[in-house]
């Protein structure tokens, strides 16, 4: 083959999109997704969870205001302590804890799929994750995968 170069056909975008669609269908049908949806439904129908989430979200607004000024805000210590307490109270509710577990399981599945696709292209591609251990391995959104709606833009439904 001296003097000849191999030609590579261009990426068939339609085929890639079809495969992505099939992966999406498989994700929707996965046990992880079914558990996530079921536990989210249970949490949303639980009056105790609803009350704790609402209380946390109200405190989160105060916390965000205090964060604008940092430790120099007169209420910084109190609000920081209270937001942690509200979060612990919220996470102790059985339906919230079950939902968080199902959410983490689904997130792990999505990460593994994304990581597999990225690695097929290059091992240096970063893949967003909410798991700080993946951050140490070079993945993630670059700001800790916080899941709190912070500077990285991660968001979590209803402040959880």
Image: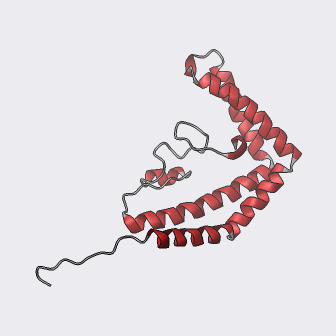
Is 137 or 147 nearer to us in this picture?
Answer: 147
Left or right for 93, reference 69: right
Q: Residue furthest left?
A: 2
Q: Quadrant where the C terminus lies?
A: top right
Report the residue at 82% width, 45% height from top.
Answer: 49
Q: In this view, does 84 lie above or below 156?
A: above
Structure colour scheme: secondary structure
Q: Quadrant where the N terminus lies?
A: bottom left
Specify the quadrant of the image occupied by residue 4.
bottom left
Q: Is residue 140 above or below residue 22?
A: above
The picture places residue 96, in percent across and down from the top left corner, at: 77, 50
The picture places residue 41, in percent across and down from the top left corner, at: 81, 55
The picture places residue 63, in percent across and down from the top left corner, at: 66, 27
Is 1 or 140 nearer to us in this picture?
Answer: 1
Report the residue at 79% width, 36% height from top.
Answer: 54
Left or right for 111, reference 42: left
Report the residue at 60% width, 45% height from top.
Answer: 147
Q: Is residue 131 above or below residue 150?
A: below
The picture places residue 64, in percent across and down from the top left corner, at: 63, 28
């Amino acid at each position: 083959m001296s003097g000849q170069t191999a030609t590579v056909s261009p990426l068939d975008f339609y085929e890639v999109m079809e495969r992505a669609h099939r992966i999406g269908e498989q994700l929707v049908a996965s046990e992880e997704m079914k558990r996530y949806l079921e536990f989210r439904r249970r949490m949303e129908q639980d009056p105790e969870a609803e009350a704790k989430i609402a209380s946390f979200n109200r405190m989160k607004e105060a916390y965000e205001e205090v964060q604008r000024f940092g430790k120099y805000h007169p209420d910084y210590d109190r609000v920081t302590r209270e937001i942690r307490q509200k979060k612990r109270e919220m996470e102790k509710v059985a339906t919230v804890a079950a939902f968080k577990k199902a959410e983490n399981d689904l997130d792990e599945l999505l990460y593994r799929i994304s990581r597999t696709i990225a690695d097929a292209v290059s091992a240096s591609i970063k893949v967003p994750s909410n798991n700080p251990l993946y951050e140490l391995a070079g993945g993630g959104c670059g700001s800790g995968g916080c899941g709190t709606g912070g500077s990285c833009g991660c968001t979590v439904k209803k402040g959880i």
